[in-house]
Image (tube, helix red, strand yellow):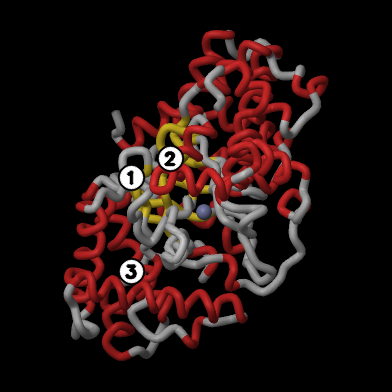
Amino acid sequence: MLRSPLLLAILLTACVRTPEEAAEIDPQIASEVASIKAIDNHAHPVRPTASGEKPDTEYDALPVDSLEAQSDYVRSRPGSPALLAAHRALFQGDKAAAAKTYGQEYALKVLDQLNIETMLANRVALGPGLPSPRFLWVPFADALMYPLATDSLVQNPDQKAFFALEAKLLTRYYAESGVATKPVTLDQYLDQVVRATLERHKKDGAVAEKFEMAYLRPLAIGNPAKSAAEKVYATGAGDYRALQDYIFRFIAVECGRLGMAVHFHTGAGGGGYFNVGGSNPMLLEPLFNDPSLRKTHFVMLHGGWPFAHEETALLTKPNAYLDFSAQTFMNYPRDVAQNLRAWLEYVPEKVLFATDAYAYAPPAAGWEEVGYVANASGREALGMALTAMLRDHEITRERAGELARMVLRDNARKLYGLK
Ligand SMILES: [Zn+2]
């Protein structure tokens, strides 16, 4: 067990870099960064299930195992040193024994190993073994944007699978809302299915709604007239995008009213058909600039890589935040550190630590290993960025400690109103 912050600091850095390389991080900063109990803004923890029980499938609305093969980035490949090191470090390399020993406590024990106090769990549902408040729920809202058949929207085999999954989730939302068939008018649909679902999510503890929109369509969201959206809803004819955009805006306003943030996947994503250009966070600027949406907090997940630079500029919007999940296992700490430094020099109050812990290829790359790598690399990148700022006399040592606490915990605490 990692009870000593110093030991944890050494392990967190040693698993991805040699001691000589790690020394470029100021030792005091390294130990402070390692010792902070973090809030993880975005992850997909898998629910522990007993043997014989159906395995958990609710960790994503659009799981990556339905994708065609792509050219994998180096760090995610089987046998990648970072993943192997993570596997050895977790539960002394024996996850199966730990899962048996800890049972329903298993996911909590994983959080303890990563020194993560609170993990925002982006899942269809939370369920047993992922107790609140250590896990806080972030459900999915994309399905609500597609009340009509989606065959005409499918452009590739990956999307065919994705839209089928969204249809399934919408069916579930109908059932949970007590609505049997598609309501006659758009207003009725918005009230009886959309608002009802958002209010239910809120009541069940959700702190945000997540959009995986970039997997389905570009992030360019227009501002259509209601009459245009109503016509498409009623007849199925016309511009389906106008209906989607109108519903999105309704959801965003409702999230603001209910005190839930809106999470967007931004930047590169999984699958060889993923539209990287359509995931550019700059496409969200009209939303951030819309006075009617200023009460809604938007969080750009994954730091928008490869558009991290653009995302820096968007941080000046009062309702825009970002996290640096996924970058931390796709990319190496030096690259992430450069992005982090730019954000911390600009608007540090809205930069959030996150892992995107995800079961890409279990058991070797389960959510635990991916979370371990992202957590270690994320903290290392933060240490590198703060050290560079300190050595360039941009910040004092005290401010470095303060920035570490803000990024790892306090910024998220403020955004979600956590204790
Ligand atoms: Zn994710």
- Point out which mark residue 246 bears: 3
Where's residue 21, x and y in %? 80, 24
Residue drawn at x 62%, y 44% is 94
| Vertical position of residue 381 compared to residue 320: above or below | above
Q: Are marks 2 and 1 in contact (CB under 8 Å)?
A: yes
Residue drawn at x 76%, y 19% is 24
* Amino acid type at mark 1: Pro
Where's residue 35, x and y in %? 53, 20
| Vertical position of residue 79 compared to residue 27: above or below | below
Residue drawn at x 66%, y 30% is 381
Residue drawn at x 53%, y 21% is 3
What residue is pinned by disc 2?
108
Where's residue 173, x and y in %? 28, 71
Dot 1 crowding, Cα within 10 Å, few <14, some 14–19, many 20+: some
- In the rendered view of the protein, which quadrant contains the C terminus? top left
* Amino acid type at mark 3: Tyr
Q: Are marks 1 and 3 in contact (CB under 8 Å)?
A: no
What residue is pinned by disc 1?
131
Helix, strand, or loop for circle 2? helix
